[in-house]
Image (tube, helix red, strand yellow):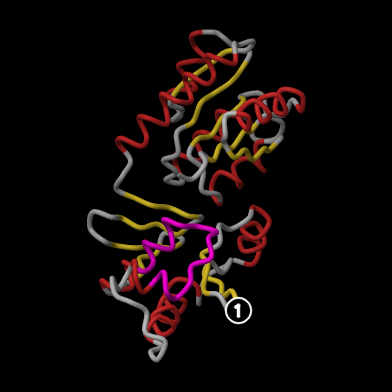
Amino acid sequence: MMAMRVLVIEDEQKMADLIKRGLEEEGMQIETAFDGETGAQAALTGNHDLIILDLGLPGRDGLQVAHDLREGGLKTPILILTAQDSTEMKVAGLDTGADDYLTKPFAFAELLARIRALLRRTHTEDTTKIQIGDLVLNLINRRASRAGKEVQLTNKEFSLLEYFMRHPDEILSRETLSEKVWEETFDTLTNVIDVYINYLRNKVDRNYEPKLIHTVRGIGYMLKTPSVESQMVAEAKA
């Protein structure tokens, strides 16, 4: 099972480090951001299971970040951490799209309990879509989109892309793709997998940045989760 990926957007370095260290000890993969703008970019371009969001951020504050993420279509659960414990502030945080609210100071055990509850809820309910960066697969109607634009895929192309998106940042050999997507033993005399990879690249990557599907010479292919930096460069060129 892949480790849970958590994005911590917190401007207090000491607090961010404490949360990061504690969650890593629980086997989670942690990414940190220290201001609202960087945090929002990381949330939109990453592939996280949960976002922990402070409200008092420099630049774009936490309420604005939560609002913008939801407006952008991001479904990742958001847990707000803040020293502001007024009822009005809690209501404002939840109304902007956050899923839970925890005030500082807090017991780490309670933070873990709330994280587990949010992840359980998400894994139970959110099984209809897969998203990596701005690439989205709708598993119900078997449609794909990138940067909000629909991408027309055949059934086999969709199945191939779905397998890539369920195994991001993993090197997938032609043998593996043949067995898992085509459900047959790999034939070294055929180039059908390479042909379908080219089909996907033309539809998913050709007119977009950053490129997602990469060749690993002599081994196979990989769908790479876009970094914050690459996504920002792509947006600057747009």
Residue 219: x and y in percent read 55, 75
Which class describes the residues within 10 Å of circle 1: few (<14), some (14-19), or many (20+)? Answer: few
Please state if 208 lies on the left or on the right of 130 as rendered.
right
Residue at the (48%, 39%) spot, across then down: 49
Q: In this rendering, is residue 208 above or below 90?
A: below
Which residue extends farthest left? 141
Q: In this rendering, is residue 187 above or below 213?
A: below
Q: Which residue is mark 1?
A: 217
Residue segment shown in magenta = 160-177
Residue at the (49%, 8%) spot, across then down: 87
Which residue extends farthest front? 185
Q: Main secondary structure of the magenta part?
A: helix
Residue 113: x and y in percent read 47, 18
Residue at the (56%, 33%) spot, across then down: 64
Residue 39: x and y in percent read 63, 40
- Residue type marked 1: Arg
Label 1 residue SS = loop
Q: In this rendering, is residue 138 above or below 234?
A: above
Please state if 50 lies on the left or on the right of 122 as rendered.
right
Residue at the (44%, 59%) spot, across then down: 135
Query: Is residue 165 covered in magenta?
Result: yes
Residue 59: x and y in percent read 70, 35
Please state if 74 lies on the left or on the right of 35 as rendered.
left
Which quadrant holds the N terminus?
A: top left
User: Nearest the camera: 167 or 179?
Assistant: 179
Which residue extends farthest right? 14
